[in-house]
Amino acid sequence: MSDPITYLCIRTSTARKAGLHSTGTLDYAILKDAESVEVFLAVTGNSSSGYYSRVAVPLTAIESCLSYLQEGGAIPAKTLKPAFPRGKSVNDAGFLLAVLRAEGLLSPAPEGAHLSIRSGDWSAWRNAVLAETGEPFELPTKQAKTAMTAPEGNPAASITASPPSPPRKGKKARKDSGERQAHPTTEEDENHAPRD
């Protein structure tokens, strides 16, 4: 078993989520190891809903995910999934994509906002991070509860997200069984209604 990595934080920042229907922002940290050999990216907070894994993703693992791309080739977020250990959050790849966009390493593709293309100078970015001194950093071990707040101007109080209810067991009732669903009837409906 290898020794745990000692992380140094170069900077923290915020990224806008990249999903088509996503809202909110992500807090993240740019890290390096104490020997200044490897750069890591880690999501550290989420302003809205969605779990994330508390792991530092090596830049080399991210580059490995993108190594097969042709120049200007577009990728969906799921391309980054292998950069994470198995069994982590389904949101991780999309959140990592948002961080890479915030750092200027990916950009939205012309083919559609759900795709990204490589941009920026990855080598220069890595070298700049490794040249910084950094401060000791520990990854959070537990995800904080996310409070969802009402939009400005709405007097409603803050709402704390509750866990989803468990799925129901058993068969679902068919729509055509039992009584008909209540809905407004029109004259045309009455003319076509079955007679007893």
Image: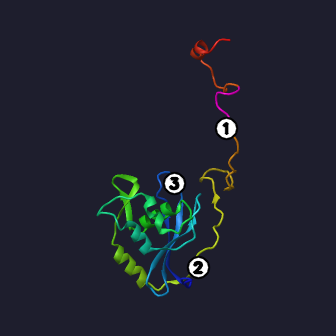
Rendered image: mark on residue 22: 3
Q: Is 173 one of the magenta-colored residues?
A: yes
Q: Where's residue 15, x and y in %?
A: 48, 64
Q: Is residue 196 above or below residue 70?
A: above
Residue 75: image x %, image y %? 38, 59
Left or right: residue 118 compared with residue 181: left
User: Which residue occupies 43% across, 67% down?
Assistant: 100
Give the residue number, with chain letter if any, for mark 2: 138
Q: Amino acid at mark 2?
A: Glu
- Residue at (46, 59) in percent of width and height: 78
Predominant SS of the magenta segment: loop
Say which amino acid is labelled 3: Ser
Q: Residues within 10 Å of mark 1 (few under 14, many from 20)?
A: few
Mark 3 vs mark 2, CA separation in Å: 28 Å
User: Can you tell which mark lies on residue 172?
Assistant: 1
User: Tag 1 or tag 3, which sits nearer the N-term?
Assistant: 3
Residue drawn at (35%, 68%), measured in percent from left and top?
Answer: 67
2 with respect to 164 (left or right): left
Q: CA distance from mark 3 to mark 1?
A: 30 Å
Work out whether 22 lies above or below 100: above
Q: In the displayed orientation, state which residue is furthest to the left.
A: 71
* Location of the N terminus (image quadrant): bottom right
Helix, strand or loop for disc 3: loop
Depth check, mark 3 against mark 1: the one in front is: 1
